[in-house]
Amino acid sequence: MPLIACGINHKTAPLAVREQIALSPECMPETLRELLEHGAANEAIILSTCNRTEIYTHTFTLPRLTDWLAAHPKIGKVANSAHWYWHQDQRAVEHMMRVASGLDSMVLGESQILGQMKQAFLLAQKTGTVGSELQRLLQKVFSVTKQVRTQTDIGAHPVSIAYAAVNLAKRIFSDLSKSEILLIGAGQTIELSALHLADHGVKRLIFANRSTTKATHLAHQFGGQSIAMADIPLHLQKANIVISATSSTLPILGKGMVESALKVGKRRALLMLDMAVPRDIEPEVAKLEDVYLYNIDHLQEIVQENFKSRLDAAQQAQAMIDIHARYYMRQLEAQDANQIICAYREKLENWRDAALAKALDSLKQGEDPETTLAKIAHTLTNKILHTPSVQLRQAALDNQMDLLLAAKKLLGL
């Protein structure tokens, strides 16, 4: 069964190489159509993200596919390199299931890739490059992915510092949407934290940074508010959660500042997440009543524990994928066998009908019935045996013992 999954990803190629062949959504329809128009594939889907560019095809002409890849102005740069990988038939099915389930992702178990694969599938459908084979395969891939994500803990535990911080906050404040959160810094960690908080419905996000331009940009991006660093004590009085990740060499929040803010803002629980190295929050702050202070080491411990949990879940997920991929291929093989049987039956029935028509014509012309029946039997026997006899003799000349043994079993001899 000529199912192919080929491409590059973050494991086989550095970012500089992945950037070279990344395909934009605008050029994707044209690329898909070229694949089919050049006879390189019967059906095709292309998945292109920051971490991978992969082509999923059903093709009977593998040499044409390799030629097309080599000639492509972008893909041809790496199609014949060590960065490029090929998976065929069952391995292709397994690979696609692993990708969709997050087992092949840079962050083990991440769910974003499933949405990206679905978008690639819908785009190929809209372009007209998805037929019955890939339609059936992708539906199976999505079905297995759903089972993996619901029946294992592959995506249940956070494995990034920002995600771990937000999940820790959710454990302490069951409804984050009602919390006011002060985020200090404007780097990737703060941006990711804000993204996760927004996913939990948080509306009151306060951004503080030495560069007010960066703070304003983040505030605009997430519908929050930007403030100057000097205004932190004022907003600390109302905040439920503080997340800090700056590059400051000295602490930004001291015990005195936090203690004063708590007194003015009345007694309440305050969660402080210090994700900076060196630390942004003085360790002595943890001694204050109603303050829960976690630094990056605490969060790393959570991430490591969760990553171990995901590894265990990944083993379960892989076992599920192995079973489903084998079963899918068996179904395809059974379908291929049925197609062969149907085609061979149709061929024999055509011969039979032609011989019968000729025999009836002979009988109408007065030919002896026994002679007519003998001719039918002789003609059909010769037609049925001719091609197998030629192939078996050639197999014997070529010393193809496996084919001869298979023929003996097939013919019941």
Image (cartoon, rainbow, N blue to C red):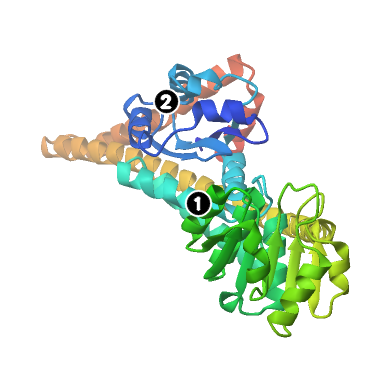
Disc 2: CA contacts within 10 A as few (<14), some (14-19) or many (>=20): few
Q: 261 left or right of 67?
A: right
x and y percentages locating residue 411 in the rendered image: 55, 38
In the image, residue 147 sits, relative to residue 106, either above or below, namely below
Q: Which residue is drawn at 81% across and 51% down?
A: 250
State the residue in front, 142 or 253: 253
Name the amino acid, label 2: His
Q: Which quadrant holds residue 26? A: top left
x and y percentages locating residue 224 in the rendered image: 51, 64
In the image, residue 302 sits, relative to residue 392, either above or below, namely below
Q: Could you give the CA–CA distance between mark 2 and mark 1, rounded to whole angstroms?
A: 79 Å
Q: Which quadrant holds residue 176? A: bottom right
x and y percentages locating residue 404 in the rendered image: 61, 28
Mark carried by residue 15: none
Quadrant position of the C terminus in the picture: top right
State the residue in front, 112 or 294: 294
Disc 1: CA contacts within 10 A as few (<14), some (14-19) or many (>=20): some
Res 171 visible: yes
Q: Residue at x 64, y 70 (%)?
A: 234
Q: Mark 1 points at which residue?
A: 217
**What kind of element bears circle 1?**
helix
Taking the view exactly as shown, the residue that stands out farthest to the left is 365
x and y percentages locating residue 86 in the rendered image: 59, 31
Q: Which quadrant holds residue 381? A: top left
Res 152 visible: no
Name the amino acid, label 1: His
Taking the view exactly as shown, the residue that stands out farthest to the bottom is 267
**What kind of element bears circle 2?**
helix
State the residue in front, 240 or 73: 240
Q: Mark 2 points at which residue?
A: 386
